[in-house]
Image (cartoon, grey):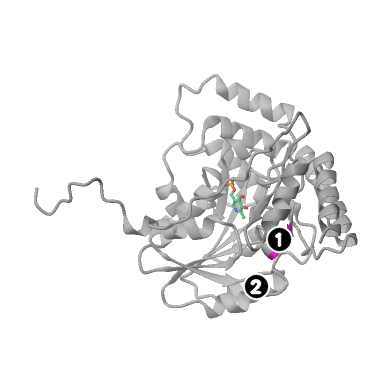
Amino acid sequence: MSGHDQTGPRLRDALQGIPTYKPGKPAQAEDGAPAFKLSSNENPYPPLPGVLDAAMAAVHEFNRYPDMACSGLHAELADRFGVPVSHIATGTGSVGVAQQLLQATSGPGDEVIFAWRSFEAYPIITRISGATAVPVPLDADEVHDLDAMLAAVTERTRLIFVCNPNNPTGTVVRKDALVRFLDAVPKDVLVVLDEAYNEFVRDEACPDGIELYRDRPNVAVLRTFSKAYGLAGLRVGFAVAHEPVAAALRQTAVPFGVSQIAQEAAIASLRAEDELLGRVGALVGERNRVVAALRAQGWTVPETQANFVWLRLGERTTDFAAACEASGVTVRPFAGEGVRVTIGETEANDLFVRTAELFRKEL
Ligand SMILES: Cc1ncc(COP(=O)(O)O)c(C=O)c1O
């Protein structure tokens, strides 16, 4: 037929040149030496027995589709956070929900603002939506520059990500600064508070997005079961947002995207929250120990409130990552910028701290 190119399917121009998401490298064991993966901000603890049991019970029925409305999980989440059930939306990890938020708000000609460097999925999913990514550099302390982000708002802005704590720096925006920012952003722009690491926060000046969303219809909060709750492999995250944003998330959801196994495990995790948050407390203790050790070695380490630390190594980034790998820990390098290292098992953290010390001595 005329007008058709016979060389192959036409793909959207928007996809050209979009970087692919880089997963953290797996642990590389050499000669039977212990190897640890500190490259994906995962929880090093294995599933709790009760959570495993709940997931295993659902395994026996995977010939059936899951509950598409995730009713049990939504009810549990609404109760846990004291919000209406209609304000809860779940998806295939919080990155899946973030992508749905973009589908719901942004397309060609629209602009999406986020800090940079931040979660590497933001520019990818923004560009997939066809919208234009507007990255705004972090300030000198590796914190979101909210004034600059506000100055970047135009008539075309549809969505703003605020990653709090920020991946990969671990830094947080303070409540007073965030409230000023939210008050100044036009009300037709959706502000997404991505709180994937919320449970690791110990700084009281760091806001709880769920408190801030309550009287702000243009604020959506993203949380996940992947980090503190240790369900990364099951892919379940959620948003808390007012109607009509939550309704738009139901419209844009991949049907049956959250498996019954994930739903049951998430419910069991909420019920076992005390135990899980106890583990988070131990990881926070490890984080503080690692940060103190690195600073004692002379490194500049930004104040992290997440389950990882950030070292801005510039040109030495790749060498540092290679040194870590050689010693048995894989970390997440961002070439030319720095290295993000997840807080893992004590043994892994020790290995990393020792490697950092040796590397520093050789500088
Ligand atoms: C800031 C941030 N948001 C969202 C996610 C996505 O997590 P998930 O899709 O597993 O919920 C991550 C994962 O690394 C993250 O760092």
Please indicate whether residue 41 sits to the left or right of residue 235 in the image: right
Number of marks in the image? 2
Please indicate whether residue 137 sits to the left or right of residue 49 in the image: left
Name above or below for residue 85 compared with residue 113: above
Name above or below for residue 194 compared with residue 134: above
**Amino acid on which the number 2 mark rests in the picture:** Val
**Image location (x, y in percent) of residue 235:** 56, 40
2 or 1: tag closer to the N-terminus: 2
Nearer to the camera, 155 or 22: 22
Q: Which mark is residue 5?
A: none
Q: Is mark 1 within 8 Å of ligand 1?
A: no
Confirm whether the magenta stretch covers residue 313: yes
Instruction: Look at the numbered disc 1 and give the secondary structure of its residue.
Output: helix
> Would residue 253 be visible to someone looking at this image?
yes
Q: Which mark is residue 316?
A: 1
Name the residue located 72 percent from the left edge and 44 percent from the top edge.
Answer: 325
> Would residue 282 be visible to someone looking at this image?
no
Name the residue located 62 percent from the left edge and 51 percent from the top edge.
Answer: 223
Q: Which residues are magenta?
A: 310-314
**Amino acid on which the number 1 mark rests in the picture:** Arg
Mark 2, residue position: 179
Name above or below for residue 61 compared with residue 283: above
In this rendering, the label closer to the viewer, 2 or 1: 1
Q: CA distance from mark 2 to mark 1?
A: 37 Å
Name the residue located 12 percent from the left edge and 54 percent from the top edge.
Answer: 3
Nearer to the camera, 236 or 134: 134
Nearer to the camera, 75 or 220: 220
Please indicate whether residue 12 sits to the left or right of residue 115 in the image: left
- Mark 1 closeness class: few <14, some 14–19, many ≥20 residues within 10 Å: some
Name the residue located 71 percent from the left edge and 41 percent from the top edge.
Answer: 43
Nearer to the camera, 19 or 40: 19
Instruction: Look at the numbered disc 2 and give the secondary structure of its residue.
Output: helix
